[in-house]
């Protein structure tokens, strides 16, 4: 029987910082600046990433509004996983006519992003919605593709990908 492998680091803290800097520059380039751009971090994993991106964007262009979104009540798999409300949704501006960049740590099946798109409707009608993730695992169940990716990381379906400011670990 082969030995079980422990968690393995696939991105370091420096790799995360570089990926976020690259993503911030890509956001500026694609949107011809940051005017009208709003970052919305998905609870839980995307909120700290949206905050980091906002700080980087403020150093490149101008500050952008940053919000957080809890999609618990908009998921289509409520019967398969428990609803854990209590995460904060805070959208600081109307989204009408703005470019919303949804920010999350990992893109896997696409179901969280689908729920986020539905939840955004409560806060206005954006001109466009873009998606930024640190890790794209593949395994999509819905036709959702990120606009900005830190790293494409094919994984087994049963692996757990953990993203933090300290790096990315597969367990």
Image (tube, grey):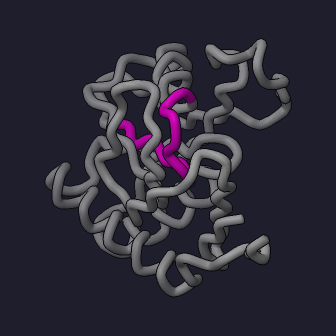
* Up/down of 21 relative to 62, above or below: below
Residue 59 x %, y %: 37, 75
Residue 152 x %, y %: 39, 60
* Up/down of 87 relative to 59, above or below: above
Residue ranking furthest to the bottom:
14
Q: Quadrant of residue 1?
A: bottom right
- Name the main secondary structure of what is drawn in magenta: strand
Q: Residue at x 79, y 24 (%)?
A: 81
Q: Name the side, left or right, on which 99 lies relative to 115.
A: left
* Up/down of 11 relative to 103, above or below: below
Residue 50 x %, y %: 53, 55
Residue ranking furthest to the front:
1
Q: Quadrant of residue 24?
A: bottom left
Q: Residue at x 47, y 51 (%)?
A: 137
Q: Residue at x 68, y 31 (%)?
A: 70
Is residue 109 inside the magenta stretch?
A: yes
Q: Residue at x 45, y 57 (%)?
A: 154
Is residue 133 inside the magenta stretch?
A: no
Residue 66 x %, y %: 52, 48
* Up/down of 42 relative to 160, above or below: above
User: Between 170 and 70, which is closer to the camera in this rendering?
Assistant: 170
Quadrant of image for the C terminus: bottom right
Q: Count all numbered tags in the image, as a single digit.
A: 0
| Magenta-tinted stretch | 100-111
């Amino acid at each position: 029987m082969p030995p079980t492998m422990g968690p393995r680091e696939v991105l370091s803290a420096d790799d995360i910082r570089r990926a976020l800097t690259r993503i911030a520059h890509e956001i500026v380039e694609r949107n011809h600046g940051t005017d009208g751009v709003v970052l919305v971090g998905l609870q839980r994993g995307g909120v700290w990433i949206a905050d980091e991106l906002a700080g980087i964007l403020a150093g490149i262009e101008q500050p952008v509004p940053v919000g957080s979104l809890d999609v618990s009540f908009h998921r289509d798999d409520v019967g398969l996983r428990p609803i854990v409300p209590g995460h904060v949704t805070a959208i600081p501006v109307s989204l009408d006519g703005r470019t919303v960049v949804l920010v999350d740590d990992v893109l896997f099946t696409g179901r969280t992003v689908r729920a986020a798109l539905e939840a955004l409707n409560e806060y206005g009608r954006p001109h466009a919605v873009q998606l930024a993730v640190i890790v794209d695992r593949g395994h999509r169940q819905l036709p959702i593709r990120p606009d900005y990716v830190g790293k494409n990381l094919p994984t087994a379906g049963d692996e757990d990908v953990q993203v933090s400011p300290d790096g990315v670990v597969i367990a």
